[in-house]
Image (cartoon, rainbow, N blue to C red):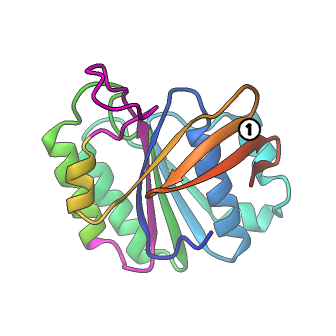
Amino acid sequence: MDLKGRHIHLAVEGSTGGTTVGLHFAANTIASGKRVLWASTDMPNPSRFSQLFEHLSLVESSRFHAMNFGGRFDRAIDALLEAATSLPSVGLVVLDDWCEASGRIPKDSLEQISRFRKEAPPHICILLISKGSIDASGTTNEPILARAAEHMSNNGYEIWRLWRAKEGGYRTLDCAGECREIKLEDSGVSV
């Protein structure tokens, strides 16, 4: 999947593998010779990280740059922008669990995400991973909804969704309206 220059908001059903999808994209980006910036309040599970990166050499793995963005979100965005523009060959920036797991995403956070897209180099893929929500009103039969979808779309982000398709590692990945059945495996994602 060509991610170059794409801006993606991935809304996931809880515990369905959003971080695994992000790590899979990160490993592929690194294998193509690019760097990855990963920001989250919690770092990926070390065992899962090892599984997804085991095919990369130690030198290649060193192109994965992780930071914790606890504290002021605007400062984390500033740090990511500085790294994205000063490090050579950045191909992907992932913000995993960048907002609270439920409720409305704060306006300030949405403004910072919009600023990040506008100020980041245009060739970099930005992948935002957050928990989606369900429609309690019953007006739609969609399994998962992206929070702040209208704001994200209006600010240049594609809306992707990930949910459990059936038992086991099977998931449905909706890439801006194009649904793909995927399977989460030890080595990553297979189609």
Q: Is residue 78 left or right of residue 191?
A: left
Q: Which residue is mark 1?
A: 48
- The residue sitting at 56% across, 41% down in the picture is 18
- The residue sitting at 57% across, 27% down in the picture is 15
Residue situated in front as seen by the camera: 181 or 76:
181
In percent of width and height, residue 42 lies at 51, 33
Residue situated in front as seen by the camera: 157 or 135:
135
Does the magenta segment cover residue 127? Answer: yes
Vertical position of residue 134 compared to residue 155: above or below: above
Quarter of image, res 50: top right
Quarter of image, res 171: top right
Q: Is residue 123 left or right of residue 162?
A: left
In percent of width and height, residue 148 lies at 24, 43
In percent of width and height, residue 57 lies at 83, 64
Task: In the displayed orientation, state which residue is furthest to the left.
Answer: 107
Vertical position of residue 61 compared to residue 18: above or below: below
- Mark 1: which amino acid? Arg
Residues rendered magenta in the picture = 119-147
Does the magenta segment cover residue 36? Answer: no
Q: Is residue 54 left or right of residue 70?
A: right
Q: Quadrant of the N terminus?
A: bottom right
Q: Is residue 89 left or right of residue 148?
A: right
- The residue sitting at 33% across, 36% down in the picture is 99
Secondary structure, mark 1, is helix
Quarter of image, res 59: bottom right
Q: Quadrant of the C terminus?
A: bottom right
